[in-house]
Amino acid sequence: MPFEYLALLAAVCWAVGSLLSATASSHLGAFAFTRWRLACAASMLWLWAFASGSISTLAMSQVPLLAISALIGILIGDTSLFASMNRLGPRRAGVLFATHAMFSVLLAYLFLGESIWGWTLVGCGLLSSGVMTAIVLGRRAEEQHHWESNQSQLRSGIALGLTSAVCQAASTLMLKPLMETNIDAISASAVRMTVALFAHLLLFWAGFKVARVYLPMTKKIFAMVFVNAGLSMVIGMTLILQALKTGDAGLIGMLSSVSPVLVVPLLWLVYKRRPALGAWLGASLTVAGTVLILWH
């Protein structure tokens, strides 16, 4: 499958998984939520790697880079995202995290020599504008949530949201040269999740206050965590790593950033909330940008 479609499929997985993340993250806390879903994701990935035989493609010399990528993208990046979400709410945190698409293009240009020109550049501009429009203008006036009026943690929430975006872009781009070798994406994902899990466990065992569980785990919350881990981390991140084997890292980051727009119809389907006009406008721009990118 072409890398563009792999990136879009990853965005679909992240969009569906995100419907479950806000409730579980608020219940457990950002660190505890990430720790639990890493445990679920690592278990699933290692079972998949051994069953498929992809473990044979993994070399010990490749582990250090995978570990560094995991610490940046998952330990710091994912945890920062959910901490930002807990402070600002899903909408405002989503705006900040969506900037990872632009960071991906910039870093790919600076460090990988990738460049985007012509109609593809126009498509990227439309896509980014559409994602931002859908998030910023996609809320109805009557849907005011207590997060929207929370100003007490605004600065820390913004800082954490931007940190998550930069870490997401950097951790993905640094794997581009590695994924062009014969390493299988499943084994690479398994190593990343395991390293990040042990880092989280060390923080928890060391007694860091931020790593504590807010509220006890329940069957309902565990189900949310498990499904989120399967969709977002097992399938979504593995698709991104597979896309890096053949595609430009900047374009992969750009196309995978459409998940906030994909959430709009999912919210309409699940919660029967008709999207606002701004959401339709943003979705239209995103679709137009995506079509231009795929066309060229």
Image (cartoon, rainbow, N blue to C red):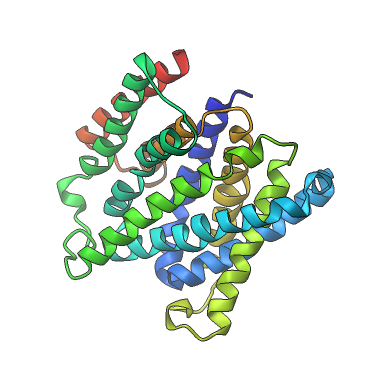
Which is more toward the observer, 64 or 19?
A: 64
Judge from the rendering whether residue 248 lies leftward or rightward of residue 29; answer left or right.
right
Residue at 60% across / 23% down in the picture?
2
Residue at 75% across / 55% down in the picture?
46
Residue at 37% across / 18% down in the picture?
117
Image quadrant containing the C terminus: top left
Which is more toward the observer, 89 or 141?
A: 89
Judge from the rendering whether residue 20 lies leftward or rightward of residue 235; answer left or right.
left
Indicate whether 114 appears above or below 101: above
Which is more toward the observer, 216 or 30?
A: 30
The picture quadrant where one finds residue 204 is: bottom right
Image quadrant containing the N terminus: top right
Indicate whether 245 appears above or below 38: above
Indicate whether 254 appears above or below 28: above
Whether residue 18 is visible: yes
- Residue 43 screen position, x and y as percent: 71, 60
Whether residue 223 is visible: no
- Residue 278 screen position, x and y as percent: 21, 34
Indicate whether 53 appears above or below 195: above
Q: How many marks?
A: 0
Residue at 45% across / 43% down in the picture?
15
- Residue 199 screen position, x and y as percent: 58, 70
- Residue 151 screen position, x and y as percent: 16, 66
Residue ranking furthest to the bottom: 207
